[in-house]
Image (cartoon, rainbow, N blue to C red):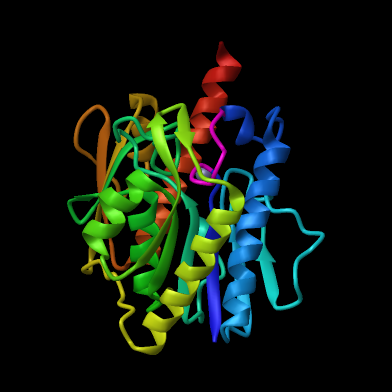
Amino acid sequence: MKAFVSVDLEGMPYVVIPGHLSLKGVMYNEARQIATKVTLIVAEELHDNGVDEVVIADSHGPMVNLLTDSLPDYVELIRGYPRPTSMLSGIEGCDAALFLGYHAKAGTMRSIFDHTYSSLSISRLEINRIESSEFLLNAYGAGDLKVPVILVAGDHQLIEDDVKKYSPWVETVALKRSVSRAAARSFGISRIERELRAGVKRALTNVREQRAKLLVAERPVKMKVTFQSAYFADAAEMLPIVKRIDGLNVEFTASNMTEAYNLFELLCLASVGVDAIKKDQS
Ligand SMILES: [Zn+2]
């Protein structure tokens, strides 16, 4: 059996300030150590329970967050960004997916680092008219490739809002509970480790007893994107497939979720370009 693990940072325990999240952040090193510890606990538990190969997609920001000096030989690490299908890179051919360090979508009340994919440019994403978090985006992407998501570990609010609502069969572990957008509480790492190991065991039992299900987006896939600025929507509508709805909203239809995912990523990359140009002009 081959498992896929996608690792974000914002939903990791103890990660609470912007300085945890960027390459030059003052507490980036702490965040890297926490994310590595959590990821290796999950990888080890997967391996101890019969998983032969673990593909890990480092999936936050520059996507080089995880420390590499103690990776076991059953692990393959995917790092670096930009890349096609972003947080799902490497999922093809895996039997199950686990998402770690995931967080609530943009606009969620009192929820740590709430955002959807790009905190620079995106204020709302809809997939087939369903307001989507990164969890839903990636779970639909996995479902399109016939890979069931079996465990989500991250912010409690994401688990309550989206994971339980759209995929109640998925095992969950709350790594932290938000107090506000800027604060959260978490238990000690030994308790987190115990809960993660138990969660992985339950998730693999679900696979063996055929309780794991795919989350599948109906085809064709319709995406509606609300940008934070008309600068970004102006750039997005240059792509012929993209239809401008109004100042901040665009939509497009893709034949499947992988295509929709990559188009969405392309619009986010275009926004980064527009932002760089505007900064250069000021
Ligand atoms: Zn992130």
| Residue closest to the far right | 69
- Is residue 15 highlighted in magenta? yes
Q: Position of residue 30 (x, y in %)?
A: 69, 39
Quadrant location, the C terminus: top right
| Residue closest to the far top | 282
Q: Is residue 162 left or right of residue 235?
A: left
* Number of numbered markers: 0
Where 103 sits versus 67, above or below? Answer: above
Q: Can you tell which quarter of the image residue 83 is in?
A: bottom right
- Is residue 282 highlighted in magenta? no
Q: Position of residue 102 (x, y in %)?
A: 45, 50
Please state which of residues 233 and 198 is positioned toward the viewer in this rendering. 198
Please state which of residues 239 and 233 is positioned toward the viewer in this rendering. 233
Residue found at x 40% / y 36%: 178
Where 121 sits versus 217, above or below? Answer: above
Quadrant location, the N terminus: bottom right
Where 109 sits versus 266, above or below? Answer: above
Residue found at x 54% / y 55%: 191
Please state which of residues 237 and 41 is positioned toward the viewer in this rendering. 41
Is residue 81 among what the camera can see? no
Q: Position of residue 261 (x, y in %)?
A: 39, 57
Please state the extent of the stretch shown in magenta in the rendering: 10-17
Q: Is residue 125 left or right of residue 270?
A: left
